[in-house]
Image: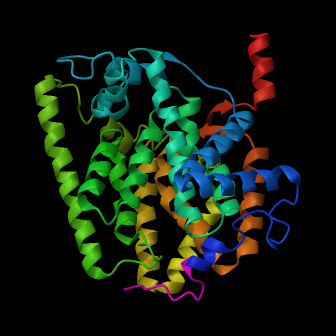
């Protein structure tokens, strides 16, 4: 079903331009620094393994991202949603969190509690999750493209809401949710492990269930899309995990004697509270802030899926619709659209399979756009907190 018939083989993608040498005809930036960076990754990959190279690339990308947007916010309404649970995530009765529906967002707080980080220090755990997450993305893309394409891809994604929310708003553990979602995508051949990753992701944010449509069509090792039988197995895993989470969540709320989780906020969303406050002049800007220029690769992924099968293309559009509609029903639309990230990753690989040089140049231009435009958290009715570049942030801190 939906078998990929591209003439370019996976092995070709792995060997072409593996090292940024003078012989490579598709060197993105012919400057000494870029050549040395790519050669370093190639050396680490050869001697220490691909995961080690991914970690090195991820650290480099995170450093670049921090220089680009260095501001972080520690408002109590941000941090207490995390620290109010990390003090004792299994406390019976009321807990000091700002919103009752966050009671089951236990993933980050439980990790912080387990390692003994009870205060603001625990909010750094989601920030640290960015490194292995970008490392895994590097491996996925590197196995299908080249060293420098893997590096430019993680640099691009490090300038998006995929990684930056947790680092700029301490107390939001989105990065932990995304790394679990990514894990569920990358272990499609191991249903038990896949279900575990999805289960954990939902205990970070129940909206993680929105990646299930992408799990069903996630390509296998040869870049071929799964057959009907494999899709059926993945469907069973997703449904079983969702049921297990719902049952365990109800049981936990009963054990916690926590009766404050009501539908009042949902009623507010649907009943007019937030819908009436939506301003179209901000909505598109807030949506843009999720991936900024990186959105281009989502459209490339859709285009490629559509070419392979009209049914598959329509399926992907429906999956996006299921993400976009709930995102509009909540105020922080930039974050909510972050669950589209699987298509960004696939779009990077798909454009490489079409034309390697165009792919490198396009990714480089998108990265430049992301670095040159300011980073905001976007509401449906306003642009929210801005993260300033490091030099400006130093001045802001100095001036108080």
Location of residue 247 with respect to 149 vertically, above or below: above
Q: Is residue 396 left or right of residue 375?
A: right
Q: Is residue 282 visible?
A: no
Seen from the viewer's position, the closer of residues 233 and 48 is 48
Seen from the viewer's position, the closer of residues 141 and 35 is 35
The image shows a total of numbered marks equal to 0
Percent from the top left, x then y, of residue 158?
A: 62, 46
In the figure, residue 194 lies in which quadrant?
Answer: bottom left
Quadrant placement of the N terminus: bottom left
Identify the colour scheme used: rainbow
Residue in the picture at 54% in, 85% down: 307
Seen from the viewer's position, the closer of residues 136 and 299 is 136
Location of residue 344 with respect to 224 vertically, above or below: above
Percent from the top left, x then y, of residue 275?
A: 45, 44
Percent from the top left, x then y, of residue 155?
A: 67, 50
Please state the extent of the stretch shown in magenta in the rendering: 1-10
In the figure, residue 314 lies in which quadrant?
Answer: bottom left
**Main secondary structure along the magenta-highlighted residues:** loop
Quadrant placement of the C terminus: top right
Residue 235 magenta: no
Residue in the picture at 55% in, 19% down: 74
Q: Is residue 117 visible?
A: yes
Residue in the picture at 32% in, 40% down: 266
Percent from the top left, x then y, of residue 233?
A: 23, 70
Q: Is residue 213 left or right of residue 235?
A: right
């Amino acid at each position: 079903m939906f078998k990929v018939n591209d003439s370019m083989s996976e092995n070709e993608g792995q060997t072409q331009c593996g090292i940024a040498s003078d012989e490579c005809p598709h060197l993105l930036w012919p400057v000494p620094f870029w050549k040395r960076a790519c050669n370093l990754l190639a050396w680490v990959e050869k001697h220490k393994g691909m995961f080690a190279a991914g970690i090195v690339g991820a650290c480099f990308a995170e450093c670049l991202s921090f220089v680009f947007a260095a501001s972080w916010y520690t408002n109590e309404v941000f941090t207490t949603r995390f620290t109010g649970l990390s003090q004792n995530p299994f406390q019976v009765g009321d807990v000091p969190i700002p919103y009752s529906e966050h009671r089951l967002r236990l993933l980050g707080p439980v990790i912080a509690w387990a390692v003994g980080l009870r205060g603001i220090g625990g909010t750094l755990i989601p920030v640290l999750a960015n490194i292995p997450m970008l490392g895994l993305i590097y491996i996925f893309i590197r196995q299908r493209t080249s060293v420098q394409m893997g590096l430019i891809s993680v640099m691009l994604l490090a300038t998006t809401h995929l990684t930056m929310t947790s680092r700029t708003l301490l107390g939001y553990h989105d990065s932990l949710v995304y790394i679990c979602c990514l894990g569920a995508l990358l272990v499609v051949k191991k249903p038990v492990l896949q279900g575990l990753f999805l289960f954990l992701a939902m205990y970070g944010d129940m909206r993680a269930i929105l990646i299930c449509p992408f799990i069903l069509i996630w390509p296998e090792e040869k870049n071929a899309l799964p057959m009907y039988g494999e899709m059926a197995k993945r469907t069973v895993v997703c449904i079983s995990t969702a049921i297990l989470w719902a049952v365990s969540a109800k049981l936990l709320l009963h054990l916690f004697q926590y009766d404050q989780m009501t539908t009042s906020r949902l009623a507010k969303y649907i009943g007019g509270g937030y819908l009436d406050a939506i301003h179209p002049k901000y909505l598109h800007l807030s949506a843009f802030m999720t991936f900024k220029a990186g959105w281009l690769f989502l459209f490339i992924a859709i285009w490629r899926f559509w070419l392979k099968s009209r049914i598959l293309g329509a399926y992907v559009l429906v999956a996006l619709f299921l993400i976009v509609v709930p995102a509009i029903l909540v105020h922080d639309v930039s974050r909510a659209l972050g669950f589209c990230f699987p298509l960004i990753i696939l779009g990077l690989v798909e454009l490489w399979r079409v034309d390697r040089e165009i792919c490198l140049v396009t990714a480089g231009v998108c990265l430049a756009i992301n670095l040159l435009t300011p980073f905001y958290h976007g509401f449906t009715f306003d642009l929210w907190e801005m993260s300033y570049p490091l030099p400006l942030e130093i001045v802001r801190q100095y001036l108080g």
